[in-house]
Image (cartoon, grey):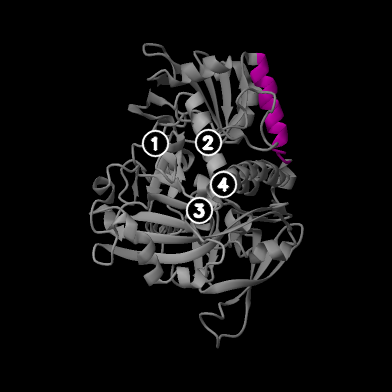
Amino acid sequence: MTVSTSGAGLGPAPYDTDVAIVGAGPVGTFLAIMLGKRGKRVTLIERWTEAYGRPRAVTFDHEIARILALLGIDSENDPAINYHDELYYWRDAKGENLQIVDWQSTSASGWRVRYWFNQPELETRLTGIADKCPTITQIRGCEACGLEQDAVSATLTLRRNPEEDPAATGTRTLRARFVIGADGANSFVRESLGLENEDKGYFFDWLILDMLPKFDYVASRPHEPAQWQLCDPKRPTTIVPGGPGPEGKGFSRRRWEYMVLPGEDPVELQTPAAAWRLLEPWGLTPENSKLERSAVYRFQARWAKDWNKGRCAIAGDAAHLMPPFAGEGMCAGLRDAFALAWRLNGIIEGKYGLEVMDSYTTERKEHARHYIDFSQELGKIICIADPEEAAKRDAQMKADLAARGNVPVPTDVCQLGPGAWVSESAHAGELSVQGVVEANGLRDRFDQAMGAGWMVLGLGADPAEALGPERLAQLAALEGRTVCLGQPGMVCDAVDAEGTYAAWLDGLGATYVLLRPDFYVAATAADADALRRGFDTVMARLAVPARAEAAVA
């Protein structure tokens, strides 16, 4: 096995790699890229030689668009991604509205609320980025079959995947500073670590049909929304986009999801003949459409009680499973990877103590649980097959909708669990607002104009002056920066071109905000004294080690 040398300046070490990641789906590959971009030696292990070429996830939210933009993937203009300027509707069997969700607006984080994509194309894009990173080694066709760890390392035992190569014998070991399991719902890493699941006992079987119509489906049915839920007890159904067609050309993909009714045979239901029978009322036939995938999935709601143990951690489906009704499953996994990336990079570079991994569990578990609960509640609405119960649901939801004047509900704001942020600060623990700024000769979203990382923003005030020399040195050690935001005509680091930051911080009663590398707010402050207190609290929670301790991280 060839392992590239790290560009992180760590020098020789008795490790084969800095981080070994088991599972090369979107979560594991994204994590590998975020580590590799910082020069970390990463070994990405995938049990299958060839990538799975069928869709699974089809949608992501504004936060994921913001994260992908760091890799140069522009969700507004990418051929593998599209969007619909429409609301998200929940309707009864008569076609009358039960609920309306705002998936139409631009979000507070500066991107549209919702995007649709083709997962195989996105995975190919991510794999291509990883291929070009010299410090990432990819091992395909191998699976982990052993895991041990001590105080300074974790060692994986690998073997050829017996499902691909039954005659293969022998194993090899890989010693890493850290091992991450992004290896799916049946995670080997999770089981090896003895991490137990909390299961909500939620099980529904649904048939997933991924379709490529050879015509403009949305235009052909102007009386229907582009994205909606049919809450019909005779057959609860989801009808949503599936991302662009091949190479972004021609007509878009579509997805239908049908609840498997009591007494139905899931095996028979997922046959092509059954699929075409279900699709006939929607105008799809073998002559005008291509069936890309037909599969029955069991929707579940569960999460691991702990997500890290020693030098190992889990992410994505290995850590949590949720029903798809909120479209947040893959989103949660990519958030996991992003949260791990800045922690692992910082620990290996000697910026933080190993203890910061504990806040990965406390923060991400509560965040994912929010979406699991939210998805399950949505599932309770749609997964009703009893006509009387459905009638009561319809009456209540229509009354609630009428009471608020049919105004769409906004997407929710979710807060991290306790961790490396200041709970006493307004908006802390939430995703930061992002606006358009003018800086460095650019007019663009803040991330693209100013970059990402630890940031202290000041609205009409200089954060550097407020922090003082000692704290500025701490910030510099984290490669962080201060940014003074001002109105047009002011002398500042960046101009708040559309007044987004002024509106946000004025609403919080804040002058300063401390941002983390994952775009979450660590602290807000009304004055310099409050900024210094919040800054000190966050630095303490990062557990920055002494120089001698950093040398063995």
Nearest to the eye among marks 4 and 3: give it: 4
Mark toward the start of the polypeptide (1 vs 3): 3
Residues marked 2 and 3 touching at CB (< 8 Å): no
User: Which residue is painted at 62% across and 34% down in the image?
Assistant: 415
User: Which residue is painted at 37% across and 58% down in the image?
Assistant: 121
Residue under pointer 2: 395
Mark toward the start of the polypeptide (4 vs 3): 3
Q: Residues within 10 Å of mark 4 (few under 14, many from 20)?
A: few
The alpha-carbon separation of the residues under discs 2 and 4 comes to 11 Å
- Is residue 17 found left or right of 331 in the rendered image? right
Whether residue 131 appears in this view of the structure is: no
Viewer-side residue, 336 vs 70: 336
What are the residue bounds of the magenta stretch?
Answer: 529-545
| Helix, strand or loop at mark 3 | helix
User: Which residue is painted at 48% across and 54% down in the image?
Assistant: 234
Residue under pointer 3: 36
